[in-house]
Amino acid sequence: MTLAILGGSFNPVHVGHLALADAVLSTFHYDRILLIPSFQSPFKESGQGVSSEDRLDLLLASVAADSRIGIEDCEIKRRGISYTIDTLNDIEDRYKPQGKIGLVLGDDLIE
């Protein structure tokens, strides 16, 4: 299985997140993409917006009809700020993807 990941605060999840996930699957031909909500974004102040548990529930509901899109809660379970390398290592160990994991970044992280 080829795998891409899209991390973010998803605060809240919106159609743009889902369109990006679909575009990654369609354009780059990954078998699956995992959306990974952060517990606390290192780029945003904590305590703003929707709780991590509610964001997780909203994500699960928003992708329920598309088996190509999964939700991974490792960063929420980890609590605090998570770093990409730790998440990549966790995903690699858990999912054993074929080839390299595709790392998708939102344009809000690129300057």
Image (cartoon, rainbow, N blue to C red):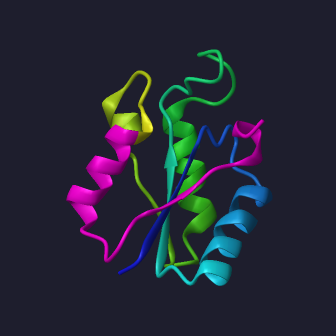
Q: Position of residue 60 (x, y in %)?
A: 52, 58
Over which residues does the magenta segment extend?
A: 85-111
Seen at 49% across and 49% down, the residue is: 36
Seen at 31% across and 55% down, the residue is: 91
Indicate left or right for 106 with 90 as reference: right
Indicate left or right for 19 with 79 as reference: right
Q: Position of residue 28 (x, y in %)?
A: 60, 79
Pick the quarter of the image with the C terminus: top right
Seen at 64% across and 30% down, the residue is: 50
In front: 102, or 46?
102
Q: Is residue 51 above or below residue 97?
A: above
Q: Position of residue 83 (x, y in %)?
A: 42, 32
**Residue 58 visible in the snapshot:** yes
Pick the quarter of the image with the N terminus: bottom left
Indicate left or right for 49 with 82 as reference: right
* Residue 102 lies in the magenta-colored region: yes
In front: 10, or 44?
44
View extreme (left): residue: 93
* Residue 37 lies in the magenta-colored region: no
Indicate left or right for 54 with 106 as reference: left
**Residue 74 visible in the snapshot:** no
Q: Is residue 73 above or below residue 91?
A: above
Q: Position of residue 58 (x, y in %)?
A: 60, 50
Seen at 51% across and 79% down, the residue is: 30
Q: Quadrant of residue 15?
A: bottom right
Count of labels in the image:
0
